[in-house]
Image (cartoon, grey):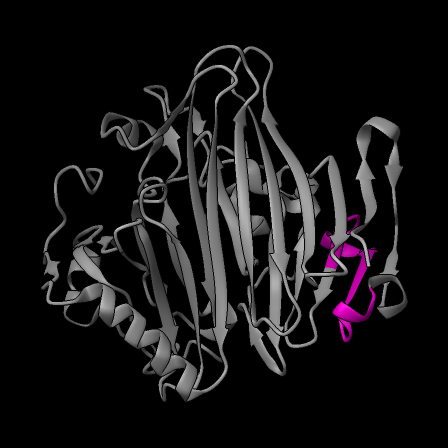
Amino acid sequence: MANKTWTITELASRTHLESLAVGLADLGAALEGCSVRKQTLRGGLADGVDVIRVDNGAFRFDVLPTRGMSIWKAWAGDLEIGWKSPNHGPVHPQFVDLGEPSGLGWLDGFDELLVRCGLESNGAPEFDENDKLTYPLHGRVANKPAHHVVVSADGETGEIQIKGVVEETRFHFFKVRMTSTISTRPGQTGFQIRDEIENISASPAEVQMLYHVNFGTPLLDAGSQFVAPLKTVVPRNDHAASGIAGWQNYGAPEPGFEEQVYFMELLADDSGNTRALLKNAHGTAGVSMSFNKRLLPCYTVWKNTTATEDGYVTGLEPGTNFPNPRTYEGEQSRVVKLAGGGRTTFDFGLHVQVNAAEVTKEEEAIAALQGDTKPRVFDTPQNRWCAPA
């Protein structure tokens, strides 16, 4: 059966489907048990948010074209992958004021499993000498709706793709386009993302990208552990340094817990490929990510094990840079420079381990990358890694 496509949104032709239901009759025998459904949410802060649910028979996940092609939640059977944010979303960008004077407006919409930070900036908010906001927290792309969204299914390979085009532009300033392709195949417990970033200006541009991937219960629990092939680990500030002895381990929800952040460089194979894993306390389930360190050289672990009601969550975050203020990261040359019309591509994969054997296999792959290398773990923030407090 040939490749089939369905256009969800096409701004140029004023096309927009309020709903779509694609099943076996449309997908063909190669995709038996798979489906794609699209709906537009109504009511509350979610009013107007488009959600595309992809089900490959073993794994299902929700894509949010309205929120920069984020992944809202995912499920492997009954195992939910994501977290429980106090923001009951998904939140439409119209309710997120990125220009709020505090620079923290981005937090009003934050509740996704995977949200991109960028593209002009992706770190902490930054202010000029007059205390005027210059760069908001984590950038703008997560609150930019896609203006072109297409679903496709390959009747021969069984691959399902969701492709969306998002632009972050401002007249006289930054002009960048992201074409995101999210794909999965029948039986896979995960998905792959390919993001092509294009400078649509004739002038040079500097780009940053960070994949803010967030996990709460049930994968995150007392005794959960982060596992990765480590070269260097640096606490972001003195508070994070106070927890450096147990930085890879997670505690139970603790009301009032102050977030701790660790910056690191991972080891990789000869092609630059690397991976990282979060496993639950008993090692019976986990979730891993794969990416290329040459394109995403910086890795951040955010521990926010506060009370469940307040957002018990950890963020595992590969990026082009560390989420320090934009000017500081620029001074360290942690930006991607694109000539006028230039492009770059980021690939990211998320994979769920549904039993102890799969978790062990993932740990063995990470151990092979670690080899005999002893990680260097600093007990204080380091110059050129951490912006001054």
Q: Is residue 139 above or below residue 349?
A: above
Q: Residue at x 35, y 85 (%)?
A: 281
| Residue 182 within the segment the image draws in magenta | no
Residue 274 is situated, as x and y percent measured from the top left of the image, at 32, 57
Residue 373 is situated, as x and y percent measured from the top left of the image, at 11, 63
Q: Is residue 50 above or below residue 147?
A: below
Q: Is residue 91 left or right of residue 113?
A: right
Q: Nearer the viewer, residue 386 or 316?
A: 316
Q: Nearer the viewer, residue 156 or 37?
A: 156
Residue 7: quarter of image: top right
Q: Nearer the viewer, residue 352 or 145?
A: 352
Q: Is residue 168 left or right of residue 35?
A: left
Q: Which residues are magenta?
A: 28-52
Whether residue 90 is visible to the viewer of this picture, yes or no, is no
Q: Residue at x 85, y 69 (%)?
A: 24
Q: Residue at x 61, y 52 (%)?
A: 182
Q: Residue at x 54, y 56 (%)?
A: 192
Q: Quadrant of the N terminus?
A: bottom right
Q: Is residue 323 above or below residue 147?
A: below
Residue 312: quarter of image: bottom left
Q: Nearer the viewer, residue 77 or 332?
A: 77
Q: Is residue 328 above or below residue 221?
A: above
Q: Is residue 383 left or right of residue 165?
A: left
| Residue 46 within the segment the image draws in magenta | yes
